[in-house]
Image (cartoon, helix red, strand yellow):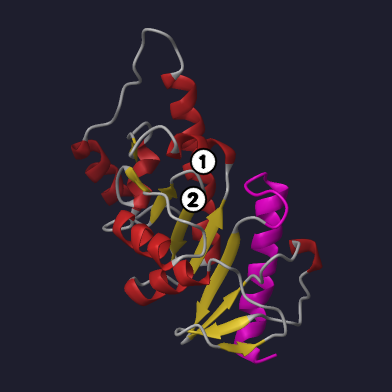
Amino acid sequence: MRPDWAEAWGELVATARRTVADGLVVGTSGNVSVRVGDTVLVTPSGVAYDRLAADEPCAVDLDGRQVAGALAPTSELPMHLAVYRSTGAAAIVHTHAVHATAVSTLVDELPAIHYMTAALGGPVRVAPYATYGSEELAAHVLEALRDRSGCLLRNHGTLVYADGLGRAYDHTAQLEWMCRVWLAAASVPGRAPALLPPAELDRVARRLRGYGQPG
């Protein structure tokens, strides 16, 4: 394996397995990818994540041509490549998380139920439904991601990108949690959840840029 791929592939495999352990996907659903230069390392199609070999990466170029690995890449490759070609994404996590998928069937946008909405750029849009793996779905996702780093896919799941797999996974987990909170609050008869105004989301977004430890 190329030296610059080894660490990235190891993190990808660990992240993919974590999506199963944390209940964000079932079986071989969902997929994970990471960009290394002009190459995209991506989970293969229909392979359980506990069977992914640490030394056998599945890699394609930005045009989708396979450059390494014997296993076919995920069927959602068009969606991943569209995001990489159109944004500054370094990593993508796509899941079929239960609460997020449920929310995707109810609204066109996840309301601003929590301040972590700001971490994804604002209220999370729902991309219209299209068959999985299609160019149509990829186009819908790009539109839903306009000025955002995450979206819901109607009757399907979530997609989040970031500057690294750790952040992409963390924001995916936060998105699923926010969907769970909104579903719980919205289910109370006769009550409507309180939502955060745009000005507060802007304030939080500024604070989040300095969040955490230096470096």
Dot 2 and dot 1 residues touching (CB under 8 Å): yes
Q: Amino acid at mark 2?
A: Thr
Q: Residue at x 68, y 81 (%)?
A: 57
Q: Which residues are magenta?
A: 1-28
Q: Which mark is residue 59?
A: none
Q: Residue at x 79, y 62 (%)?
A: 50
Badge 2 or badge 1: first in the primary sequence: 1
User: Which residue lies under the disc numbered 2?
Assistant: 158
Q: Is residue 36 magenta?
A: no
Q: Quadrant of the C terminus?
A: bottom left
Q: Amino acid at mark 1?
A: Thr
Q: Is residue 157 visible?
A: yes
Left or right of residue 41: residue 48: right
Residue 168, percent across and down? 50, 59
* Dot 1 alpha-carbon crowd within 10 angstroms: few under 14, some 14 to 19, many 20 or more: many
Residue 15, percent across and down? 64, 61
Left or right of residue 11: residue 179: left
User: Which residue lies under the disc numbered 1?
Assistant: 101
Residue 83, percent across and down? 40, 69
Left or right of residue 22: residue 86: left
Residue 152, percent across and down? 43, 47
SS type, badge 1: helix
Q: Is residue 23 magenta?
A: yes
How far separated are the C-alphas under marks 2 and 1? 7 Å
**Given the current orientation, which residue lies at the most extreme top position?**
190
SS type, badge 2: strand
Q: Residue at x 51, y 59 (%)?
A: 132
Q: Nearer the viewer, residue 46 or 31?
A: 46
